[in-house]
Amino acid sequence: MVKVLFLDAPFTGKVELSQDTISYLKEKQYKKIALYGSVQFCNQLDKVHEQLKELNIEFITSKPKRAQIVSQLLGCDNFQDSFNVDLTEVDAYLYIGDGKFHPLALVYAQKDSSKWKEVICNDPISGQMLLLDWKHIEKILRKYKASLKKFLTVDTVGVIVTIKPGQEQFKPSLVLEKKYPDKKFYYFIDNNVSFDQLENFPFVKIWVNTACPRVGFDDQEKFLKGVLNMNDAYQAVELLSKESILTRV
């Protein structure tokens, strides 16, 4: 077996809020925000902390379940309970990092909420600010809601299981059989999700993803019969019956 060593690659430049971000926070008059960033920038958030205090903005953060350090945001942290802290009382989310992949997790995490809170992205590399809201994922959420409804009506389900460390959830997925005894579940186990092989199993009427939860959202187009994540499959009735962003799209 080949040994693999994972090393952090921290950003060595200056990490601070841009003038655009500062001006925007002043304009919105936010009092309390949730602060997160990608791992490259989490080691240098002291300046950001100082700037928020100067703006009289209270901030909270946490060490999410899958993260290594406090304030680190992973792309798979797209459930409210992933963060190990109550985020319902904040006015907005502030993300420190580049790109959209990681901060979109903060957008997906709000799909079950009744009130939307914007995600403010501050890129320390470009010095630019970007705003993300639920409209960035509106099309995906519509498809996802359709998959939730379809899951409740079909009798044959394909469950995708990866053997990747940290993502393998075969045993947890078995609870679906107890929750839905009227459905037949088939388990497909591999290291990678091979989208091009899915149509080789025409008897499967919908797919349940147990690997990275972003597969259930970002890769909707690759599942012609629909897909939803395991946690949402387990509580499909509850999700569709509550007042939330997901049910409003």
Image (tube, rainbow, N blue to C red):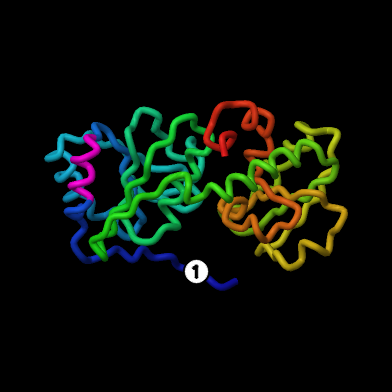
Residue bearing the label numbered 1 = 4
Say how many tags the image has.
1
Does residue 218 appear to the left or right of 236 in the view shown? left
Question: What percent of the width, then of the height, locates residue 186?
Answer: 82, 50
Q: Quadrant of the N terminus?
A: bottom right
Does residue 139 appear to the left or right of 65 in the view shown? right
Residue type indicated by callout 1:
Val
Q: Main secondary structure of the magenta part?
A: helix
Question: What percent of the width, then of the height, locates residue 93?
Answer: 34, 42
Q: Which residues are magenta?
A: 21-29
Q: Residue at x 66, y 46 (%)?
A: 228
Does residue 92 appear to the left or right of 109 in the view shown? left
The image quadrant of residue 64 is top left
Residue closest to the eye, 42 or 245 = 245
Secondary structure type for disc 1: loop
Question: What percent of the width, then of the height, locates residue 195?
Answer: 70, 64
Q: Residue at x 68, y 35 (%)?
A: 234
In this view, 126 is above or below 60: below
